[in-house]
Amino acid sequence: AKKSLGWRTSSEVLNGDTPDISPFRFKFWEPIKFYAAKQPFPKSRWIQGRFLGIAWETGDLFTFQVWSEPNGRWQDGQEFIRNVVRKRDKDEISPPTMPDQNLDSFRFKRKYRTRKRKK
């Protein structure tokens, strides 16, 4: 939105419609669940995953790219394109684990200046 346009977006001024921002309800790498209809009965059909973004070239605006987290590990996951996505509850999100690191020996590396480009 711009002040010169009366705090409206340029597409709103051009088309006369308020832009729909509802597809942008998740942040990148946000913990989510997505629906997998082909899961066998005892298992939940909701699979834990992470949000990657909107699948612009597939389906409608509510088609998303998600990354699965089998057993709570993103390293073992894979990418899916899904329409039915929801946020995970707070109690379903496991805190990130950090390996034990001795930070006493950590040092920043010296940054080197680069040469200016010739015009």
Image (cartoon, rainbow, N blue to C red):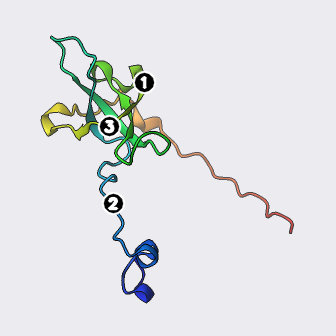
User: What residue did someone put label 1 on?
Assistant: 78
Vertical placement of residue 39 versus 62, above or below: above
The picture quadrant where one finds residue 60 is top left
- 45 sits to left or right of 104: left
- 38 sits to left or right of 61: left
As measured in the structure, the alpha-carbon distance from the residue carrying label 2 to the one carrying label 3 is 16 Å
Element assignment for label 1:
loop
Label 1 neighbour load within 10 Å: few <14, some 14-19, many 20+: few
Residue 6: x and y in percent read 37, 87
Vertical placement of residue 40 versus 3, above or below: above
Point out the tag, 2 or 3, that comes first from the N-terminus. Answer: 2
Which numbered disc, 2 or 1, marks the residue closer to the eye?
2
Which numbered disc, 1 or 3, marks the residue closer to the eye?
3
Vertical placement of residue 43 versus 79, above or below: above
Q: Using the rendered image of the protein, determine whether residue 84 is visible from the camera's viewpoint.
A: yes
Instruction: Write the residue at 42% across / 81% down.
Output: 2
Task: Confirm or deny contact between disc 1 and disc 3 (CB under 8 A).
Answer: no
Element assignment for label 3:
loop
> What's the mark number on residue 21?
2
As measured in the structure, the alpha-carbon distance from the residue carrying label 1 to the one carrying label 3 is 16 Å
User: Foreground: 78 or 59?
Assistant: 59
The type of residue carrying mark 2 is Ile
- 75 sits to left or right of 48: right
